[in-house]
Structure formats: C-alpha cells, structure tokens
Amino acid sequence: MEDTVIRAEGLTKFYRMGEVEVQALRGLSLLVKRGEAVAIMGPSGSGKTTLMNILGCLDRPTSGEYILDGEKVSGLTDDQLAGIRNRKIGFVFQTFNLLQRTSALANVELPLSYANLPNDGRDRAVAALRAVGLESRMKHRPAELSGGEQQRVAIARALVNEPAILMADEPTGNLDSKVGQGIMDLLLSLNRERNTTLLIITHDPRIAAQTQRTIQIRDGLIEENIQ
Amino acid sequence: MKIKRVLRETFTSLSANKLRTGLTILGIVIGVAAVIAMLSVGQGAQNSITSSINSIGTNIVYISAGARARFSAGNFNSVRNIRQLTLADAQALMDPFQAPSVKAVAPVIQGGDISASANGQTTTTTVYGVTTSYFSIRNELVSEGAFFNDQQVNTHARVAVIGPDLATTLFGQTTNLTGQTIRINGQTFTIIGVLQSKGGSSAGSSDNQAIVPLTTARDRVVRRAGTTVDGVYIQATSAQAVSEANTQVSNIMRLRHHVAVRKEDFSVMSQQDLLTTATSITGILTAFLGGIAAISLLVGGIGIMNIMLVSVIERTREIGLRKALGARNRDIMIQFLVESSFLSLLGGLIGILLGWLISLIIGQIASASGTTLNPAVSLNAVLLATLFSAAVGLFFGIYPARRAARLEPVEALRYE
Ligand SMILES: Nc1ncnc2c1ncn2[C@@H]1O[C@H](COP(=O)(O)OP(=O)(O)O)[C@@H](O)[C@H]1O
Ligand SMILES: [Mg+2]
C-alpha cells in the first residue's frame, strides 16, 4: 500500500470575477502520509477551503498535479470523481449539513446510497453511529439533537464508507469550546485507532496543537510547515 | 442507487412537505379526473345511443323522402322537388324478384307533439300510423293486450297501442288499460294494448308514443295527402343481407322516381349507417371533451415543474452535500425525476378514482332527469390516464432534474 495519501504539486486555483482574477491558490505543494493528522491554519480568505475542496475532489485545480491514494485525479470525469469522494473521502462540515427531515441513521446511510453494496449496509451505519457514541439516538432527527451530537452524526456519516481521509473544515467552528474539544478528541481517536488520515482546517491554535503537524497558509501558499 | 432506497427517499422528501405535495398533486388529480370523467361519459353516451339504435329493430333499413344531406351545393339544388313516398312505393319494395333480400316492409306516417288525453290528464305524444308488419319489424312487444290486425287497419278502426310512458303519464299505471278510452288529437280511440318498455334516452323516447292503424292515423290524426307516407321500414332477410337489401331497394326507388344515381330524391339509411354516424359523432365529442380535459392535465404538469424548480433551489445545499458524499449527476437526476413522476402518478391514481366517482354522479344525475346513461370507465381510459400522467411527471420533471444534476458541488455547498 502506498504510504503517501496526498501528493499535490504546484496546485493553482484562479477565479475570474469580471475584470479581476482572484488567485486563491498559487502553486501550492503538499505531501501527507497515511495516518497523519494535519491541521491547516491561516487567515480568512487565504485559500484553506479552496485547498480542501481540491484535495477532496469536489473541485478541480486550474493547474497542478494531484495524486490521491495512488490514483492520479487530474483528468478524471465527474462521475469518477464522485466515486472517489464516495469511497476514499469523508467530509465533515462546519455547519454539519445533515438532512433535517430524516433520522440520524438515515443521514449516516446517505453515502451508502451511492456505494455499490451487496446489502443495504444498515449494519455499517449502525456501527458508525456506535463508533461516535450515538447508537442510542439513531432514530432521532437532527433537530432533536444538540450541536455536538449533530456533528457526531456527521462524523459517523463521513466514516461509514471507511474512507482513507477525513476532511474537516472548521468542524468545531459552530460549537462551544468544551463540546468542540469533544469532537476534536473523537476525530483524533479515529485517526489513531483506524489509521484514517485527518485533515482539519481550524482557526483555533489549541486545536491545531493537538495534531502532529500544522500547516500555515497565507495568500494561497504554504507559509510554514510545523512538524 | 438502489430503487428501494430511491423510493424511500422520495417518500420522506415528499411527506416532509405534505401541504405542498398535496396541492401539487391536486393539479394532476383534477386533470386526470376530468379526462376520465369525459372519456367515460362519452363512452356511456355512445353505449346508450348504440343500444337505442339497436332497439329500433334488427336488420333494418329505413327509407325517407328527400336526399340525405350532402355537403355540396350541386346536390342541394338537384333535389328541389322532393317527391314524397307513397304506399305504392312500399308495395313495390315487397317484390320478391327485384328485392329478394327484403323480408318485410312497413310504411309509416308519424306526427310529433300531438295531444293525448285520458283519465282527466292531458299530455303530448308521438303518434305512429302503421300497418301490422311494423310490430315485428320493430321488435315491438306488448305487456298487455294485443296489436291490431289487418282487418282493423282496413276498417280504419279507432284502436291504439300505447307506450308505457304515455300510459303512466295518463293513467299512473301500465296495467288494466285495455278497453279504456284515450283521446288522441281530439279523437276517441280504444286502447287495445300497452307496449313493453324499450328504455332509451329521453330524446326521442320510444316509450312515449301511441301506435294506431295507418288508415285511421291518416284520417284523423296526422293528415297526409293521398297515399303519402313519411317513411318505410324494411327488414332484410338477415344481417348479411342488409347491404344487398339496401342496394335492391335503392334500385327500385330510382326506377320508380326516375332519378339517377347520386341524384336521389329519397334516402336509404341502414341501422349500420346510423350506428356509424352516431359513433363518429360521439367519438368526436368524446375526443373534444377529453382534449379539453387533457389541457388541465397539462396545466397540472406545469404545476409540478414549478414546484420541482422551487424544490431544486431550496435543496441546493442538499444536492451539494449528496454530491460531496458521492452522488453522480445521474443519481441526482434520477432522484428528482422519481419525485416528479411519483407526484404525477399518485395524482393520476387519485384522479382516476375521482373521475370514476364523477362519472357515476353524472350518470345518476342523467338518470334522475330521465336519460339512461351508464358511464363506462374503460380499461383503456385508465391505462391512458396512468401512462399520460406518468409521462407528464417525467416530461415536466426533466428540466428541474437536469438543473439539479448540473449544480457544481462546491457552489451548491456554499449556497445559503
Ligand atoms: N467561487 C469563488 N469565486 C470567486 N472567488 C472565490 C471563490 N471561492 C473562493 N474565492 C476566493 O478565493 C480566496 C480563498 O477563499 P477560501 O479558500 O474560501 O479561503 P478560506 O477558506 O481560507 O477563508 C478568497 O479570496 C475568496 O474570496
Ligand atoms: Mg474557509
């Protein structure tokens, strides 16, 4: 098995806004080993989210090479990218992004809908909820859960297809610090116990301090890479 | 994505907004109900017209004076002088050599809106003056009494056989009427029989009538010059012989009236012609009404499209999320198409039930006002409505579904 999960070289991302061109990424290169936990920090507008969208195969770079888990991503079709997101990447969003109209369990099952499973995969969804400590609340709807619990459901959803990488964009941004720390502990323990690579964008230096490595981004480039 | 999962998600997403779902479905329900009701009432009308034409008798050809309307000016001018039919014409049609396919002939004179009174009651009715052959040709049967005989015709007897509706109007009953007196057009007749009911629609109800000997009718009820008659019923020897009888009768009449082919001053109409005409008229009517109803179905479809477009916008973030979780464009497309088809199919099924109910109610109203109309919901109409409504959902769902499928995941996720 390839030891490097993320190998990105010279990534650029330009947005045209009429006359002006916004350079969100300006030739950024990055290597992440399997099982690493990496915090990405940087001021607002520095390109963190843009980078994560590209690394998560949600978006394409304007130029640059990207090899994810041994697979060359540039040049893949939309459908192939969707398949990669489904199998290899688990997203955790700042605003949870749960479907309000269905139960926690149904939310966790959502990625299974798009996977080619031999069965309905319910046991996997239940196991994922158990892993985040919410097995007893699986029939509840998001509105009946606290913010921290909702983020746990979102993490279970990210886990259910056993991805190589968990990507979290400010996962504690909408939570108070105590609950946020609980989420952080959960993510780090998943990283340790399952060897799932963790990429986490955060503003909070105390959270960044808990990862093995912190990357500082400024103006679309890596400014500092602290091991 | 597995179909079971798609259906489950469709169900949760549609039941999350029940009022909206209900209102959207309503458009389709009304459209389909209208289509079904119109088609089934049309079919029912066709059935009752067919059966009332069949009740005229079997293997019948009817001759009347005047050309059948042809929509060309030339023909119209050529029949300026209409020669009336006479008893002699009727007699000639019985010729076994020139008209071997003719089994029986019945000349008739008739008058509508003729006053009839008895038992202190007065009404109007249709009076037929006929010869004895009429009864068997028209399949008339009596519920009591008897028809008149040749001798009564020859002696201008003042006897009448009355229809059950006329009997009920005047006497409040259809039994124990033989021997009673009835005044028709002010003349006294003795009732000798009451006809069995033939049913049929109120327009031209064959149950409100009085049948009297041709001779008596001409003298006292519907006056006609000389031996003129209004029409001649002819019965062919068999169903297969109807068109031959038609030809033979036409040939004889052309010779007698000295007219060329397509210049006839009489018209020959077989029961089959009547059926064909009636069927085509009700068919056009049904198609017309069904077409109007289909427009409302179209409007319902536009309603679905509208709601699906709103839904796509509302669920932009959800679409972005689904894509982030691995949904392909095709998966999103299918999800929205299944939703819109499900909406219209559900509306279609409810609409079929409602339309069926409406057609029953129309049937009830019709029969309450004296018209026999049994709306017939045909399997074809149901299949048509089901397919059509599903197609409406698919068609009007395609555009919103494509918009959903084409959303960029990053853009969609950022959507507030
Ligand atoms: N879709 C877009 N269109 C135009 N500019 C964009 C778009 N997305 C991001 N940007 C710009 O790119 C830069 C980096 O954005 P982003 O990656 O969201 O920063 P961060 O997440 O670090 O706050 C910002 O200047 C932002 O305005
Ligand atoms: Mg950001």
Image (cartoon, rainbow, N blue to C red):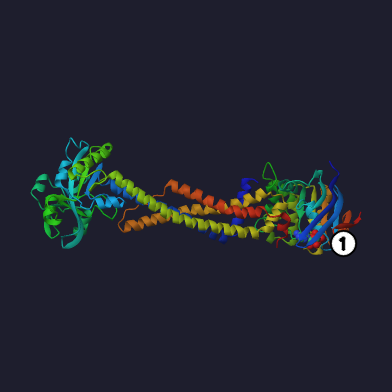
User: Where B66 sits versus B245, above or below?
Assistant: below
In front of the other: B398 or B173:
B398
Q: Is residue B199 visible?
A: no
Q: Is residue B79 visible?
A: yes
User: Where B261 sits versus B294, above or below?
Assistant: above
- Residue A75 placement (x, y as % from top left): 77, 46
User: Where A148 sits versus A108, above or below?
Assistant: below
- Residue B148 placement (x, y as % from top left): 13, 47
| Mark 1 chain | A
Report the amino acid beneath label 1.
Pro
| Left/right of residue B249 with respect to residue B46 in the rendered view | left
| Left/right of residue A219 with respect to residue A147 in the rendered view | right
Residue ID for mark 1: A205
Quarter-wise, where is residue B312 in the image? bottom right
In front of the other: A100 or A71:
A71
- Secondary structure under tag 1 reads helix
In front of the other: A226 or B295:
B295
